[in-house]
Image (tube, grey):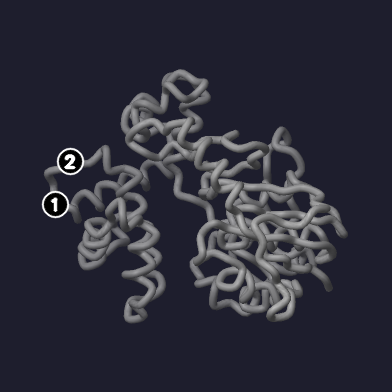
């Protein structure tokens, strides 16, 4: 993998790594630095993003005193070895270096257990790009997009969603005609399973109380066959209906209220069939789940110190009490 990255791109990757800070996470840096670089081939931008992710996945194995380009190259080599044979990295090393030490006090497994080893290996794998096709396009999407493979889940996980696909290609999916016409959304499998667990039916009324970018809201509409009433809200102003979901709604055959008729309230009107609130979900499935009561799930374990359950519960209650809703009718 490192051999495929030129010396110039290794230095570019090192510069991207150096730009990452707690205030500027990886996604923000990659978006800021790579999106405008149309002078770089798409394959190079893709390789740079993979290199930065590999560095942070394997940086505890690198010599901190070595130059950053050499550390990036070492991380890429280790990622390639691990991809070829996950047993090449011992579970004991993963338990000591891949996660913070306090996490073992929060998990039901011992660091040396088979369950812990399987979980740690999953964390170190490169994330899969998942797509969710709208139900009416699920049969034709694999033929339209190269590298589009239907999802396959273990039997114990329940039925595999027919609209979930794993994408292995390198095309910029946002530029495809299929995406521009609303035939699919880029949405990780964990988030898709949340919508299926809710199992909404046509004609029901649902409230997505933490709508974020709107992926699960649009999934709800598709599962409801675009018949019913949806409320979508988020405590972040930049993530509210008008800026995130509204531009995509027409492509998904969702009808928004006419201008001036969407009334913002502190909470939706009575008559809810059900409501949900979810934490942000990652490609590995960490951080996704239905919150049935305030504080039922603490945030993902990604900090250097253990989270405070008391603070998380308090924040969840505040978010629930302050959530505002936009009435959005979903109809054919």
Q: How crowded is mark 2: few (under 14 residues within 10 Å), some or many (20 or more)?
A: few
Mark 1, residue position: 67
| Relative vertical location of residue 192 with respect to residue 250 in this rendering, above or below | above
Residue pictured at 72% horizontal, 57% vertical: 268
Q: Residues within 10 Å of mark 1 (few under 14, many from 20)?
A: few
Q: Count the marks: how many?
A: 2
Alpha carbon separation for disc pair 1 and 2? 9 Å
Circle 2: element type: loop
Viewer-nearest residue: 152 or 204: 204
| Relative vertical location of residue 9 with respect to residue 102 in this rendering, above or below | below
* 129 horizontally vs 225: left or right: left
| Relative vertical location of residue 33 with respect to residue 306 in this rendering, above or below | below
Give the percent coordinates (x, y) of residue 202.
86, 58
Which quarter of the image is occupied by the C terminus?
A: bottom right
The answer to whether marks 1 and 2 mark residues whose Cβ atoms lie closer than 8 Å is: no
Residue pictured at 42% horizontal, 23% vertical: 104
Circle 1: element type: loop
Residue pictured at 52% horizontal, 25% vertical: 115
Which image quarter: residue 215?
bottom right
The disc label shown at residue 63, or none: 2
Q: Is residue 252 visible?
A: yes
* 207 horizontally vs 9: left or right: right
Give the percent coordinates (x, y) of residue 33.
31, 70
Give the percent coordinates (x, y) of residue 269.
77, 57
* 270 horizontally vs 3: left or right: right
Residue pictured at 75% horizontal, 61% vertical: 230
The disc label shown at residue 294, or none: none
Which quarter of the image is occupied by the N terminus?
A: bottom left
Give the percent coordinates (x, y) of residue 207.
71, 54
* 61 horizontally vs 231: left or right: left
Q: Is residue 132 visible?
A: no
């Amino acid at each position: 993998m490192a051999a495929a990255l030129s010396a110039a791109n290794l230095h570019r990757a090192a510069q991207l790594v150096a730009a990452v800070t707690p205030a500027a996470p990886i996604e923000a840096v990659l978006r800021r630095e790579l999106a405008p670089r149309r002078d770089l081939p798409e394959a190079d931008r893709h390789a740079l993003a993979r290199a930065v992710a590999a560095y942070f996945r394997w940086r505890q194995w690198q010599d901190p005193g070595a130059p950053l380009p050499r550390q990036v190259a070492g991380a890429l080599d280790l990622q390639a070895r691990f991809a070829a044979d996950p047993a090449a990295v011992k579970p004991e090393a993963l338990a000591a270096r891949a996660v913070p030490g306090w996490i073992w006090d929060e998990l039901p497994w011992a660091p040396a257990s088979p369950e812990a080893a399987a979980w740690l290996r999953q964390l170190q794998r490169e994330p899969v790009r998942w797509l969710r096709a709208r139900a009416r396009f699920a049969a034709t999407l694999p033929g339209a997009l190269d590298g589009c493979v239907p999802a396959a889940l273990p039997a114990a996980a329940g039925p595999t969603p027919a609209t979930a696909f794993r994408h292995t290609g390198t095309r910029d999916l946002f530029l495809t005609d299929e995406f521009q016409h609303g035939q699919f959304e880029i949405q990780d499998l964990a988030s898709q399973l949340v919508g299926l667990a809710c199992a909404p039916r046509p004609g029901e009324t649902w409230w997505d109380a933490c709508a974020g970018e709107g992926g699960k809201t649009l999934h709800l509409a598709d599962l409801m066959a675009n018949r019913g009433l949806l409320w979508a809200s988020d405590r972040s102003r930049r993530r509210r209906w008008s800026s995130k979901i509204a531009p995509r709604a027409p492509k998904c055959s969702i009808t928004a209220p006419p201008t001036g008729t969407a009334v913002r309230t502190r909470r939706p009107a009575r008559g809810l069939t059900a409501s949900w609130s979810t934490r942000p979900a990652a490609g590995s499935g960490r951080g996704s789940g239905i919150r049935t009561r305030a504080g039922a799930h603490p945030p993902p374990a990604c900090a250097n110190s253990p989270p405070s359950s008391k603070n998380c519960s308090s924040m969840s209650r505040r978010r629930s009490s302050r959530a505002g809703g936009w009435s959005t009718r979903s109809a054919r």
